[in-house]
């Protein structure tokens, strides 16, 4: 079909026919030409006429020289701002390897095209059924077929067309062919891709049959193309002229011959049959045979007169139905044209508005009015520029997305290559399996020829096996029931054993409590004055036997290790002879408390830690109120390392970023210059945490790690170097963190970031100031205890100075010690003040009973290690000692530091005066000795 009328959008190159003309020739005469029946396929040209839903005539042409079916059909295309599905007719052009799409099959001008030479095809697994994508360098087309079979057919055909076109291009570039030879499609000769089976052509959805059937949603107003109104108008006018020219000519439905009329009716009620090139039966003969059968049926039931009357009026009925179809199609087209006219009216209104604005500007009399119009135009231009900038930004973002998609396509192509290799290997396996299957078929054929007796034997054996299988099933059911019962019994016995273990632990704890009470009663009886000497001696003997008895000789119903999870010995060895009875009582209380807490469930605490971490590494943690509460409660061992590393890294982040290899450099310095390392480190290594099994042997790896950490710190802070007490701080850090570099930075954080200045210097000025602050706080929060200690002239700073310097290491039980460190690393020195006050509050009543200063000093040295209830101590520290703000501590520390500086200055003045007086005395003595010598002379 040639293009009529002038079109603003010319048809594509080498395209002078509509897509229906490629599959449907509407301007061809109504004929069916058959070629020779000698098997030649080159000169066969079959033309078939069909009626369109709107009353027009469409002629399908099939050229057998091409592959079986022309690649064309209706597909749904997603587009527009609403991303709606619109039905479009797609037709493939082999010369340019382009896929053109139209609104309907009868349109002459395409709405657009898709370049398949550089396109890739894919389909989403989670998308709608039939959806597939065509990705070109310019854009991505989202199409949808009627079903999955049609989708796979389109994808396979497009792949084959693209491959054929590329092969043709390669042949043209390498070996040009003569002009009289045309390049034919290799679709019929080349097989489809090896990894994809050939998909059958879906009937009625592609090719000639699809052009004769109405498309779904074709008559919807939303199916119009707003982007191409002129093309829509040209296609509509072309279709309208086409119908008028067909009405002038002989109508397709105007049939004079009754046989032809019968053929037309049969074509409307059945699908259009297109004979192949090798068929010996023509469409006319098929239609005549059907008409003869139909006439025979009518002759058997209806008289000849009635039949002639019906045949006389049948063409009129057909004309009426045709006219009704034309009326409906025209009404739909008029409705579509109305919408197009409305759209053009809007465009015209915008043009008139612009024209009116220009006229107003030209007709304006005053300069003010023209200036206002110019300002309005400038504002409009500014808005358009802003809109242009936003569109440019969107374009840039789309380009970036396109680059990302290109990289993704490259990855997909690589994966496709791998899959092709895998597919090739699978095909080889399939060939081998096919050979085996063929051999197995021969064996099976041989097996079918077995004798009857052998078959009977096999049948009998099969019956026996069925009986055995039934017996095994019964046995299996029985064994399953037996296993279930035994499992139930085992579970019950385990629960009973666990309950008995708990009861034994409770009984042993009660036994320890009763023994401690018994010893307390004996001590009270010994102090009583009503006993006679014999009774007193007997009680002393009983107490002596009880003190000498070892706790390890007691039968442990609930075994508890002698060392905790960090290697500290749980049992306490007391060396004070006068307090052995008190030590025995406290040890029994500790054991009782440990037994009761051994079955304590840490589930809620572990759940809180897991919820706070939530799979995040230490670097992504952040300070919060929940973390503060959790650290005050005490961390489980599983999470302590992560929290400690977080609290260390948050303080040393800047210095570690500047010096990433700081620890290794310091270790190298200490190795190359050993004479500059303090000798006191070697002397204190063997005295570090003697109650811990990790530090008890001199050749332990922990001892070597500890030495390297202390030497590196002496190079890190030359002002302090090394003082006694740092070895215990570094040892605790090693036990928890396990890594010596982390332990080094933990020591740096404690000494240089958390503790005040001048805390570990030779004069211990900062520590002395904190001891005076502690005495002030005790006088406020524990007035009775302070008065009692002052009455006995006991200076608690002699005891508490070690608590502050080593942070309660080897003074508190390890279970409580690590709780103190958890809160200390987060909150600072304030935690040490809280726990120091809490310790005195915990044993206040016992301390008030002691009336001797020597005994008081002995008790104060050992009583922190006898604290058994860590929860009670924590509650006293963070609840009963409130309020204790950090600002108060800093203010009081500042006051006492000024006093200490004044005292030190006064002491220095006294020392200077003493030295001067001493020098004068020595000079006088020398003068006296000289005068005596002169007299002798």
Image (cartoon, rainbow, N blue to C red):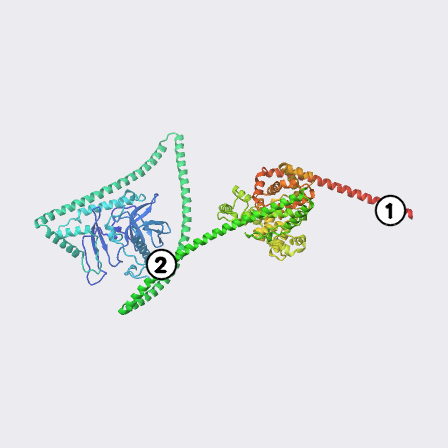
Can you name the residue that lies furthest to the top here?
366
Q: Secondary structure at mark 2?
A: helix
Q: Is residue 490 left or right of residue 351?
A: right
Question: What number is the disc on residue 474?
Answer: 2
Q: Is residue 637 left or right of residue 721?
A: left
Q: Can you see residue 653?
A: no
Residue sitting at x 21%, y 61%: 278
Residue 178: x and y in percent read 30, 62
Residue sitting at x 8%, y 50%: 304
| Residue ID for mark 1 | 929
User: Callout 1: 10 Å neighbours few (<14), some, many (20+)?
Assistant: few
Q: Secondary structure at mark 1?
A: helix
Report the number of numbered marks: 2
**Mark 1 vs mark 2: in front:** 2
Q: Is residue 550 left or right of residue 496?
A: right
CA separation in Å, label 1 and label 2: 125 Å
Residue 554: x and y in percent read 59, 52
Question: What number is the disc on residue 175?
Answer: none
| Precedes in sequence: disc 1 or disc 2 | 2
Q: Is residue 352 above or below residue 667?
A: above
Residue 456: x and y in percent read 28, 67
Proximity of marks 1 and 2: CB atoms separated by less than 8 Å: no
Residue closer to the observer: 83 or 245 = 83
Residue 83: x and y in percent read 34, 45
Residue closer to the observer: 227 or 706 = 706
Q: Quadrant of residue 429?
A: bottom left
Q: Can you see residue 407?
A: yes
User: Callout 2: 10 Å neighbours few (<14), some, many (20+)?
Assistant: few
Residue closer to the observer: 98 or 261 = 261
């Amino acid at each position: 079909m040639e293009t009529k009328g002038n079109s603003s959008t010319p048809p594509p190159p080498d395209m002078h026919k509509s897509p229906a003309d490629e599959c449907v020739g509407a301007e061809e005469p109504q004929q069916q030409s058959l070629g020779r029946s000698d098997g030649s396929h080159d000169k066969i040209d079959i033309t078939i006429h069909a009626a369109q839903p709107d009353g027009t005539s469409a002629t399908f042409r099939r050229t057998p020289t091409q592959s079986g079916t022309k690649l064309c059909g209706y597909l749904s295309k997603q587009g527009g701002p609403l991303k709606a599905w619109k039905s479009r007719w797609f037709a493939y052009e082999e010369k340019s390897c382009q896929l053109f799409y139209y609104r309907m099959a009868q349109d002459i001008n395409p709405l657009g095209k898709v370049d398949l030479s550089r396109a890739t095809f894919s389909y989403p697994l989670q998308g709608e059924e039939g959806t597939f994508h065509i990705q070109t360098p310019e854009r991505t087309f989202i199409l949808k077929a009627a079903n999955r079979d049609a989708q796979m057919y389109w994808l396979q055909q497009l792949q084959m067309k693209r491959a054929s076109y590329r092969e043709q291009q390669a042949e043209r570039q390498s070996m040009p062919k003569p002009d009289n030879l045309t390049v034919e499609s290799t679709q019929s000769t080349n097989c489809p891709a090896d990894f994809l089976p050939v998909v059958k052509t879906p009937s009625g959805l592609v090719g000639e049959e699809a052009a004769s059937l109405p498309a779904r949603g074709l008559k919807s107003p939303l199916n119009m193309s707003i982007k191409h109104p002129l093309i829509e108008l040209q296609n509509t006018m072309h279709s309208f002229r086409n119908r008028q020219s067909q009405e002038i000519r002989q109508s397709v439905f105007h049939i004079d011959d009754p046989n032809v009329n019968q053929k037309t009716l049969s074509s409307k009620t059945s699908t259009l049959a297109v004979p192949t090139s090798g068929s010996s039966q023509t469409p006319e003969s098929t239609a005549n045979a059907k008409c003869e059968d139909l006439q025979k049926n009518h002759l058997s039931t209806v008289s000849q007169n009635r039949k002639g009357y019906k045949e006389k009026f049948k063409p009129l009925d057909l004309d009426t139905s045709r006219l009704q179809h034309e009326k409906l199609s025209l009404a739909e087209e008029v409705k579509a044209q109305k919408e197009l006219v409305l759209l053009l009216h809007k465009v015209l209104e915008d043009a008139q508005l612009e024209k009116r604005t220009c006229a107003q500007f030209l007709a304006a009399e005053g300069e003010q009015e023209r200036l206002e119009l110019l300002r309005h135009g400038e504002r409009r231009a500014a808005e358009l520029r802003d809109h242009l900038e936003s569109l440019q930004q969107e374009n840039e973002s789309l380009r970036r997305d396109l680059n990302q998609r290109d990289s993704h396509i490259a990855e997909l192509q690589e994966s496709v290559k791998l899959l092709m290799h895998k597919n090739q290997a699978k095909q080889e396996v399939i060939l081998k399996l096919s050979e085996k299957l063929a051999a197995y078929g021969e064996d099976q054929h041989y097996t079918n020829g077995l004798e009857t007796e052998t078959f009977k034997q096999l049948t009998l054996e099969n019956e026996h096996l069925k009986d055995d299988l039934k017996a095994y099933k019964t046995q299996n059911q029985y064994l399953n029931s037996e296993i279930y019962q035994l499992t139930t019994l085992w579970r019950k016995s385990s629960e009973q054993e666990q309950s008995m273990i708990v009861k034994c632990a409770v009984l042993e704890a009660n036994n320890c409590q009763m023994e401690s009470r018994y010893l307390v009663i004996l001590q009270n009886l010994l102090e009583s004055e009503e006993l006679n000497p014999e009774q007193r001696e007997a009680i002393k003997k009983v107490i002596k036997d009880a003190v000498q008895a070892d706790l390890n000789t007691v039968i442990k119903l609930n075994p508890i290790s002698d060392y905790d999870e960090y290697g500290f010995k749980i049992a306490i060895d007391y060396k004070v002879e006068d307090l052995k009875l008190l030590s025995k009582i406290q040890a029994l209380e500790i054991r009782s408390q440990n037994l009761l807490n051994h079955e304590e469930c840490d589930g809620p605490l572990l759940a809180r830690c897991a919820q706070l971490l939530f799979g995040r590494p230490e670097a992504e943690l952040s300070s919060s109120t929940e973390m503060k509460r959790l650290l005050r409660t005490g961390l489980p061992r599983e999470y302590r390392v992560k929290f400690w590393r977080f609290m260390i890294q948050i303080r040393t982040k800047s210095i570690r970023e500047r010096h990433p290899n700081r620890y290794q450099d310091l270790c190298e310095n200490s190795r190359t210059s050993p004479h500059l390392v303090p000798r006191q480190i070697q002397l204190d290594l063997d005295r570090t945490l003697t109650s811990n099994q990790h530090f008890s042997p001199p050749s332990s790896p922990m001892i070597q790690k500890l030495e390297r950490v202390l030497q590196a710190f002496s190079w890190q802070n030359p002002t302090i170097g090394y003082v006694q007490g740092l070895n215990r701080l570094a040892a605790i850090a090693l036990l928890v963190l396990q890594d010596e570099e982390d332990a080094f930075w933990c020591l740096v954080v404690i000494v240089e970031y958390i503790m005040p200045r001048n805390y570990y210097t030779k004069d211990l000025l900062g520590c002395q100031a904190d001891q005076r602050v502690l005495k002030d706080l005790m006088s406020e929060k524990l007035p009775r205890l302070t008065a009692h200690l002052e009455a006995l002239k006991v200076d608690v700073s002699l005891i508490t100075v070690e608590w502050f310097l080593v942070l309660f290491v080897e003074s508190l039980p390890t279970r409580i010690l690590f709780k103190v460190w958890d809160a200390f690393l987060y909150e600072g020195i304030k935690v040490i003040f809280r726990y120091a006050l809490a310790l005195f509050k915990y044993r206040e009543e016992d301390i008030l009973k002691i009336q001797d200063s020597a005994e008081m000093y002995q008790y104060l040295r050992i009583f922190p290690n006898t604290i058994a209830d860590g929860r009670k101590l924590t509650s006293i520290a963070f609840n009963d000692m409130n309020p204790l703000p950090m600002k108060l501590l800093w203010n009081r520390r500042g006051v006492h530091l000024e006093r200490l500086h004044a005292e030190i200055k006064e002491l220095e003045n006294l020392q200077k005066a003493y030295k001067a007086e001493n020098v004068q005395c020595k000079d006088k003595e020398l003068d006296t000795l000289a005068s005596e010598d002169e007299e002798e002379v």
